[in-house]
Amino acid sequence: MTQIIVLPHVELCPDGAVLEAEPGKSICQSLLENGVSIEHACEMSCACTTCHVIVREGFNSLEPSDELEDDLLDKAWGLEPNSRLSCQAIVGETPLVVEIPRYSINMAKEGHR
């Protein structure tokens, strides 16, 4: 198992969390399985940006993002160089520290087209 430290998020994880994740699963799956209810409006199909996270430690251990993920990330709120869509970032053997941004953009929920 690989350790993921989730930094505090005012709504989803006020005290932060330390969880064990199974290598080969996405960060999003790992968070959800451990009680961190990160948004995932497209059901983890890489079609939105609601599961955007910032990988504060361990970023370079992740497989690089593909072009589709990069295109979507360009639309994410609070984009940083170490941003990923958690549904696409697969946990390996290296521990990770992730931050869930304070806001996310959910086109369907917010009435945008």
Image: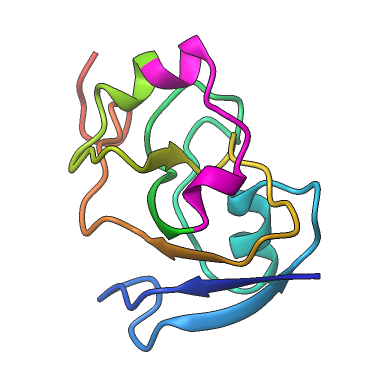
Residue 46 spot, x, y in % from top left: 54, 24
Q: Residue furthest bottom?
A: 15
Instruction: Please check the rendered image and state whether residue 65 is part of the magenta-colored stretch, yes or no.
Output: yes
The C terminus lies in quadrant: top left
Which of the pair 64/43 is nearer the observer? 64
Q: Residue at x 43, y 39 (%)?
A: 84
Question: In the displayed structure, would residue 77 be above or below residue 7?
Answer: above
**Which stretch did the figure color magenta?**
58-70
Q: Residue furthest front?
A: 60
Question: In the displayed structure, would residue 83 be above or below residue 32?
Answer: above
Residue 35 spot, x, y in % from top left: 60, 74
Which of the pair 53/35 is nearer the observer? 53
Q: Residue at x 47, y 57 (%)?
A: 38
Q: Residue at x 18, y 43 (%)?
A: 78
Residue 8 spot, x, y in % from top left: 33, 78
Is residue 28 toward the left or the right of residue 12 in the image?
right
Instruction: Please check the rendered image and state whether residue 24 is part of the magenta-colored stretch, yes or no.
Output: no
Is residue 89 toward the left or the right of residue 72 in the image?
right
In the rendered image, which quarter is residue 2 located in? Answer: bottom right
The N terminus lies in quadrant: bottom right
Is residue 8 toward the left or the right of residue 110 in the image?
right
Q: How is the image coloured?
A: rainbow
How many badges with numbers are in the image? 0
Residue 45 spot, x, y in % from top left: 61, 25
In the rendered image, which quarter is residue 62 located in? Answer: top right
